[in-house]
Amino acid sequence: MQTIHEFWNFTGFANGILGNYVMIAVGLLYIWLAVYKDFEPLLLVPIGFGILIGNIPFLPGDGIGIYEDGSVLNLLYQGVSRGIYPPLIFLGIGAMTDFSALISNPKLVLLGAAAQLGIFATFFAALYFGFDFREAASIGIIGGADGPTAIFSASRMAPHLLGAIAIAAYSYMALVPVIQPPVMRLLTTPEERCLRMKASREVSKNEKVLFPIFGFIVTCFLAPAALVLLGMLFFGNLLKESGVTTRLATTARTSLIDGVTILLGMCVGASTQAQTFLTPKSIGIFFLGAASFVVATAGGVAFAKLMNVFLKAEDRVNPLIGAAGVSAVPIAAHVAHKMGQKYDPGNYLLMHAMGPNVAGVIGSAIAAGVMLAMFG
């Protein structure tokens, strides 16, 4: 009987708390949304299963948990907590991104900048609710809809909130197709949604090769603290556009980013261990994250409408693409395109929407660099 009792003490049934079962239910919900609703399965499946991994109860001190020094999970989590995975994700994003839409229509960068309103609005909201400056700056980056940047910033400024910030950022990135459309409908008229933009001009190879070089120099002079993120983003794009490093570009945008995404998603999910994750601050971060996405979407759409006041009729932009100014690439661009086609099936907005979408990636990294310089 004593042996049975000792065995029981080591089981998850004996060590579980209510929070573990709540988080396991959340993990199952994420997997269900990915598998049966097709909500960003590449993100939600690793995160959802990671939540299951992180919330299997165990006896503390056995070297099992993600927060126990020396455990295998803790070693894998170092890639998140030390900010190693995010730059590798940026390398892959750069290698798969086409900046042609932005190069051919530079004014679209303003939409990417306007969508960063979500970052600064969330920063001030977090301060209002009692977070300190470093915590508020880390939480604010969620508003950029950029999971890797949010993780990188939090690992530097608020590592104790890293799990909550990471799970909020990636959860809302996956839910962009749910969050954005109501805001877009609210702020636009049917006529605006049907606005057709003129075709983009052809972009030369020289422009595509020079853009990542000069883009890197200019943006990093503005925000040196974002050097590693912007450097990897533009380096990956140069690998793609140079035409002489095809093998490297292919590796960066396929096997490398896929492998890192698996580890990052799983570790982010596992970091939601209920004993450390379910706190008032974590729950507050989750609600602030939702609000930040709404504000970012509204900022991009509203600024697009404002731009049209000053543009010639033939140069006007469809306000829907302003919502793509958040840096969830290419999810937000696809949402804008699908919304436009819902009201005008012949209106192809995807390439136009990619302009503010990739500008949003750059903008959120610059905003993070500013925050890191001020509070890091």
Image (cartoon, grey):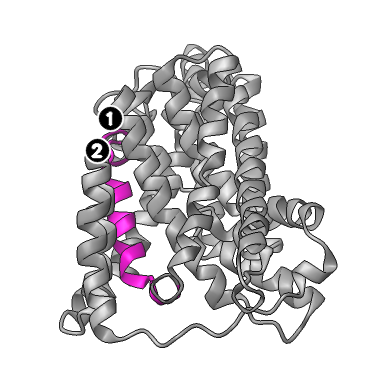
Toward the left, the furthest residue is: 244
Which kind of residue does numbered mark 1 sit on? Ala
Amino acid marked by disc 2: Ala
Residue situated in front as seen by the camera: 3 or 253: 253
Residue 19 position in % (x across, y down): 62, 23
Decide which of 112, 151 is in the foreground and name it: 112
Find disc 2 in the rendering and name its residue.
Answer: 225
Q: Distance between the residues labelled 1 and 2?
A: 6 Å
Q: Where is residue 291 in the image (x, y as percent from the top left)?
A: 66, 36
Q: What stretch is highlighted in magenta?
A: 78-101
Q: Name the residue under label 1.
A: 373
Label 1 neighbour load within 10 Å: few <14, some 14-19, many 20+: few
Q: Which mark is residue 316?
A: none
Tag 2 secondary structure: helix
Q: From the image, which quarter does the C terminus lie in? A: top left
Q: Circle 1 sits in a helix, a strand or a loop, which is it? A: helix
Relative vertical location of residue 90 with respect to residue 154 in this rendering, above or below: below
| Residue located at (82% from left, 70% from top) | 191
Q: Residue at x 46, y 37 (%)?
A: 141
